[in-house]
Amino acid sequence: MFDHKTAEMTLHRDATALVFTDLHNDFLAPDGKAYPLIAESLARNDTAENIERLLRAARSVGMKVFVSPHYYYPHDHRWVAPLTPLEDLAHRIGLVDRRTTLTLEGLEGSGADFPQRYKPYLREEHTIVTSPHKAYGTATNDMILQLRRHRIEQIVLAGPVGNLCVEAHLRDFIEHGFQIAMVRDATAGARNDEGDGYQAALINWRFLAHAMWSTSEAVTRIESSGPAARSTIAA
């Protein structure tokens, strides 16, 4: 039985970011294209409400928020290399589709749009929406660059698809030296013949992440975070 724990993670506000993947209607709205796959898990965890609680807490202390969106444009649907099963499904059902990279036409209220309840937070100055990731992790967007340029060292991570995009981002962040806290009830997962993707995510996170918190614990820690200790970072 693996039960080893590392030293408790303490947040330093100026060096910490709240990071989300895939905050789209297609995952979080009842009429979303992928919603039926994770609806049970979303309801059980109260994921949508917990995401807003985290956003509210970050805003209350001026903590930066980073969002890694997932968009597909028409040129993405002309790929010729083989797709993974979830990518293939996404392309078939038009998941998070946008018309072009150069216009917002058709985005408002679509499956690729952000839920209306989150927009007041996401439109604030301290929120950074990165370029879209195209598969699961950060290799295809500018998330790592944006975090580094803002001198972020610690990440509180969540999002609706826990065992896929959230976990892929977690693994990438670890490889780049960030300290990561996962929020276990601000996420969800789908089931397949092998079992429950949400439970698979929690099992892996226990091995990988520096901390695993409930939303209530994460909110308390965010709200009580103080100035970052930056002695090793150049001004």
Image (spheres, grey):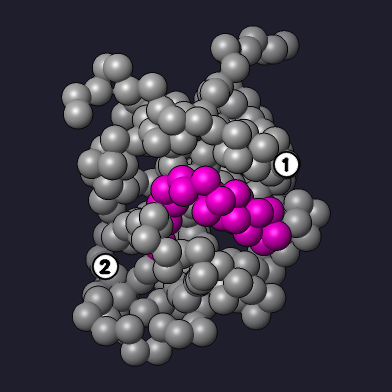
Amino acid residing under circle 1: Ser
Magenta-highlighted stretch: main secondary structure?
helix
Which residue is rendered at x = 59% and y = 17% of the image?
8
Point 26% across, 51% down: residue: 142
Q: Residue furthest right?
A: 44
Which structural element holds mark 2? loop
- The picture quadrant where one finds residue 46 is bottom right
Please identify, in this view, whether the residue under mark 2 or under mark 1 is nearer the observer: 1
Locate the N terminus by quadrant. top right
Whether residue 161 can be seen here: no
Q: Residue furthest bottom?
A: 105
Residue under numbered circle 1: 216
- Left or right of residue 133, residue 26 in this image: right
Pinpoint residue 207: horizontal percent, then vertical percent: 58, 22
Q: Give the residue at x 46% y 48%.
A: 62
> How packed is label 2: few (under 14 Cα within 10 Å), some, or many (20 or more)?
few
Instruction: Indicate whether residue 63 is drawn in magenta.
Output: yes
Residue 17 position within the rendered picture, expressed as x and y whole percent measured from the top left: 44, 42
Q: Is residue 194 left or right of residue 224?
A: right
Q: Quadrant of residue 231?
A: top left
Q: Which residue position is annotated with label 2?
A: 79
Residue placed most toward the observer, 46 or 200: 46
Residue 191 visible (yes or no):
yes
User: Which residue sits at x=27%, y=84%?
Assistant: 103
Instruction: Choose between 14 and 48: the one closer to the eye.
Output: 14
Residue 24, relative to residue 105: is it above or below? above
Q: Amino acid at mark 2?
A: Trp
Q: Is residue 121 above or below residue 10?
A: below
The magenta-colored residue range is: 48-70
Disc tally is 2
Quadrant of the drawing holding the C terminus: top left
User: In the shown orientation, is residue 162 left or right of residue 21?
Assistant: right
